[in-house]
Amino acid sequence: MRLVKRSPWLMGLGVLLAGLVTAPGARGDVTSDESGTLIIFPKVVSDGVRDTLIQLSNRTNSFVQVHCFYINASGTCSLTTDESCEIDADCPTNEQCIRQCNATNFELALTAQQPVQWRVSTGRLTTIPSAPCRPGQNCQCTVDTSGQLVCPGLLIGQNQASFVPPVGSQFVGELKCYQMNSDGDPFPGNALKGTATIEDLSSAQISEYNALTVAANADVGGGLNTDKELRLNWTGTGAGEMNYCPASLVFTANAEGVTDAFTGATISTELTLVPCSELIEEDLPAPVRVRFVGYNEFEQPLSIEAFSFDCFLNRRLADLPVSGGGIFVNGNQDLWKIRISPRPINVCYSGSNRGSSCTQDSDCGTNVQTGPGGTVLGCLPASGVLGVAEEFYSLGGSVGTAAFNLRHEGSRSGFGDIITLP
Amino acid sequence: MVTIRTRSQRARLSSERSTAMKKMWQAAARMGVGAGVALVAMAGIANARSTTNRPASIVVWPKIVVDTSARWLVAPTDTRVMLSSTNASGIKQAHCFYINATGHCSNDGAGCRDATDCGGGECVPSWNETDFDVVLTQEQPLAWYASGGLARGRFPLEGPFRCNAPFVNLQCFSDAQCPNNVGCNTGQSNLGSAIPPVPEDPFIGALVCIQFTGGSQSVPDQTATQDKLYGDATILTGLNPARYNAVGLEATGNPVSNGELVLADGGNYASCPGVLILSHMFDGAVDPITNVPVIQYSSDLTLVPCSNDFSTQTPGRSVAQFLVFNEFEQRFSTSRTVDCLFHATQLSRIDTRNPARSIFSAGVAGTLGGQTRIRGVGGVSPLGSGLLGVAQANLDFFGLRIGSAAYDLHQQGNGRSDLMILP
Amino acid sequence: MRGRTARRIAMRALYRSWLLGIGMLCVFAGAAGSQAQQTRSGTDRPGSILMFPKVVRTGQRDTIVQITNTGNSINWVHCFYLSAPDGSGYCGAVDFELVLTRQQPTQWRVSQGRRVDPTDSFGSAGAGFDPGLIPPVPPGFQGALVCVEVDANGNPLGQNRLKGEVTIMDDSTGDVSKYNAFAVAPVSENLSNPLALDGSEYETCPGSLTLNFSPRGSLDPVIENLGNGNLSSFISTNLTLLSCNLDLAAGVRSNGTVSYIVYDEFESSFSGSFPHQCWTTIDLGNTPQTTGQFRSTLLTGGAIATIFAQAQLTLPTGLVGVAESFHADQAGVTGSAASNLHTGGARSATIRLP
């Protein structure tokens, strides 16, 4: 009998390849064109004027369970409570802008390669069985007596229960979802991808952007664990739970108020930023401190130092840094490349001095909280940021819209960011 | 049973055992090395993919459309192209190629995207390229309309400049214009740039820009300051802007030789993705937000090959395989040839000329939302079969376009090797 | 005998003159020693850091900033508009860069900023070499401007060539106030970020400020004499302070307490304190912390019985400031005048650039 020689080289390669079949990509980036374990839709609008269609897909051949949070970021002034706001400067003197940053959570299940979609204002119901569309007939959802949509598709859940709950028509904020196992713990499957389409209810103008995804480290020893704290502190190799957020964001935009030479429309750009860190368990907004540095086509720089906000920012360039006081505007040339960098400072995430700069936990006063995994939520690096932007072309009362993803540069380091889960 | 061996037999056995043990350890070591090599290679593979998030050294705009007379589209259309440098110091040169994939009707010779533009005739494909240079100063953004380009003299930083001290009040374009040989402080400028308009109107094609080092011996940039370019495009159809991020391919640091850019692991640039993933609403799906039956979704898709031979004017070519999944996890498939550029004005025209019978039609697919995986295969050697693309979601009211939004495709895995050959 | 006596007298005289000389030397040394503890930064000489404590664009008021390069070489300048829009004392900044050629003066109106436009016609607001792109400040802006000499790479550079002035004008009446920027000179050639205003890298900031003022509610003698007062003229003073401790990178809060002693013409003294932040503006005599001590006895609660007074402000940290007085007649027509404050003492401070 002839003895079959085995090549040790090939055996080693084979062993490794078998192990790498389901391993996530080792790149340490937050992306908008790959799948991940954590998926972030930075801009979700349902305010009675516009609504958002979320498309979420499982790009693997495995069954996937997902836990999601809508984070409503509407804000009101501390004393003039009927005045909405985004930053302190929107409020009268000596008042602060109090952001809700309330999280509403829900769970989904997706089968292999399954895409799903839902309208955020109405949500979507689970219906078993659900009749598919047929040729020659309108393929559309119907509205249930509860106001939620019933659409053809395979949705895992209890019949007539909410597959996705409605948010109503007074919501501006973000949606964050992460992949979990059957015990409800974070699971590094890196299966999720998605897009969001924001639509004007009266004109049907649509903007679409890709959701941001964060890959997780599947390594059993040093990777994503089950302690209800998602740590964004992984470079793509070695120990760490999930990819670091980028060190800076960069995008190119038309100066606010410039006229587009082709259409004659006036262009406005709205920037949406969300923090990489979230204290969902503690129901506290994460403090953000960023710097904007812009260069126009003449290489002339302008910058905004130490801009701060909590939880969510959604502003036109005309209102950066303050309402009506934008600097990246028509009059300062026509085109701007803007870089957004989190400030390398520490701030108090909780405690009586929440939001203040600090050097140690004791600077944060009393009632400093601890995360579910034991991380002290005191003096920590100011949060990283992620975001999208949207252009508005206005002409004669009509408005065209287009959303786009921002570019990422570098990666944060050290502590990174943290998301505490309930 | 007892086996008795002589001393020589025992010595031989001992030697054979030690030799066997040695071979076993050597084999184990080779396995480990093999695994290690594979690990390094796989780490390289897992990292090196295209990106729509980061600056890169090759930037590809898969879809450039100009139709100022509204021959194809419901309203005059142009594309505003943006190219930006993130280099903190020094200029960066982009060597760019407009790829003209505009077909021409067999009946009247007019420009066309597919047969639907020819009113009974066939759309005869064609492919040619036009190249040009753009010099960007540090951190500079630049924008132009594809229909008009940007001629010399219209760039922001082309002077006049000022003479060096003490004649700083004198304007100049060159050293010769400054007294006492003090020289003209040109600093960083866009001198050397000229962007032509696209070669015809209507036009459909792509744009590829490659970061070069600049200077008198300008070569594809594989230096420490590689990966400094990123691009965007806004397709303006009336008051329906549709903006997408250009796709980037990062440099590996391996110098380019013979003008052949290898897009692969171990090559000069990141590989193209192995699979493109498109999330979409099926054509004909009623918009769930307005829920008005006459407002329906359609999507268009543009695919371009990663490989191109600009020296012999040979476009890349591959077969795009489509795997379509609906919300019932049911699967359909089809394929189409991508010859230089593939543009489907509607997804439901990919597999049939009768959209109502297409697997991309909501009535056939059975649900509103879908996910389509696109893989390129069968490239013509030495060019590869990788694909890049962009999609656009459209809302139509009785067939009239009322809203549109472009977005980038997702990607998964690495493709095989692709090749760009420069003239 | 006479010779010895004469010699003794001469020696005694010599000895006395020697003692006198020693004494004079001691006096001078003492004076010099006290001089060494006082900042030499000021409003009457060029420097490498210019601080404009009061820049406004409110209602009808606007501000024109003038900066001049007094040297014969190109000067790069990094400037920061500072404001605390929410009153919290948390100063945010918008910054821009200028390039001044040799001996070049430049100016801009803060409401309009300044573009780089080589086609500006002679005599227009933008005529001259444009120093760089300067953004306009938003309506309602109240804050400060700080400009730092840097090299072409943005690193601090101590050429000591900048001087600056500000004109605050009322667009409706044409009334103007003017003051000089506070200039901090470098001491060392080796400068780094953060900028240490400690006497070894840069000069220090003042440790005290002296303000001469008319108490709030005083009658203006000139207006009264002209017959436009009818015993209803009114003088008020606004004091604006800017902290020398500026973290322009992180924008952290800067706060403390300013102590003051007010002397009237009878040498009566009144003391108190008020809080200060990164940027502070106070209508003297019109805030809870400054009511009696800065008010004329003509007003309820006023303690100053004379038309003129002096306030000495003791600063826990380096501060610069400017005062602006408003003189109104019986019809409410108001004239204003700004004045720099006298400085004394020294305080170290730090400015951190982004």
Image (tube, coloured by chain):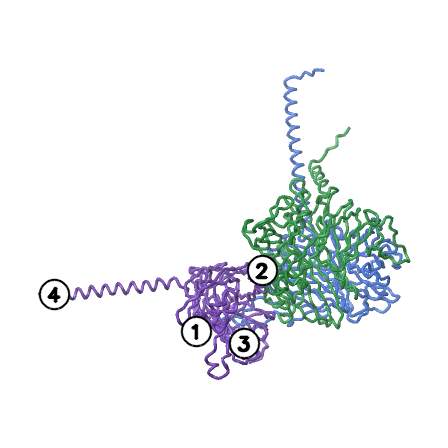
Chain colours: A green, B blue, C purple
Identify the residue shown where x is 64% and y is 68%. Answer: A324
Tag shown at residue C5: 4
Tag shown at residue B350: none
Q: Relative to B117, is B136 on the left or the right?
A: left
Tag 3 residue: C169
Tag shown at residue C306: 1
Which chain is home to disc 2? Answer: A
Q: How many marks?
A: 4
Q: Nearer the viewer, mark 4 or mark 1?
A: 1
* Cα–Cα gap, marks 2 and 4: 81 Å
Q: Does residue B172 lie above or below B355 as drawn?
A: below
* Cα–Cα gap, marks 2 and 3: 30 Å
Tag 2 residue: A306
Q: Secondary structure at mark 2?
A: strand
**Residue type of the residue flagged with mark 2:** Ala
Q: Secondary structure at mark 3?
A: strand
**Residue type of the residue flagged with mark 3:** Met
Q: A59 and C288: which one is in front?
A: C288
Q: Please, which residue is most extreme toward the bottom here?
A: C227
Residue B91 can be seen in this image: no
Q: Nearer the viewer, mark 2 or mark 4?
A: 4
Q: Nearer the viewer, mark 1 or mark 2?
A: 1
What percent of the width, then of the height, locates residue C286?
A: 52, 69
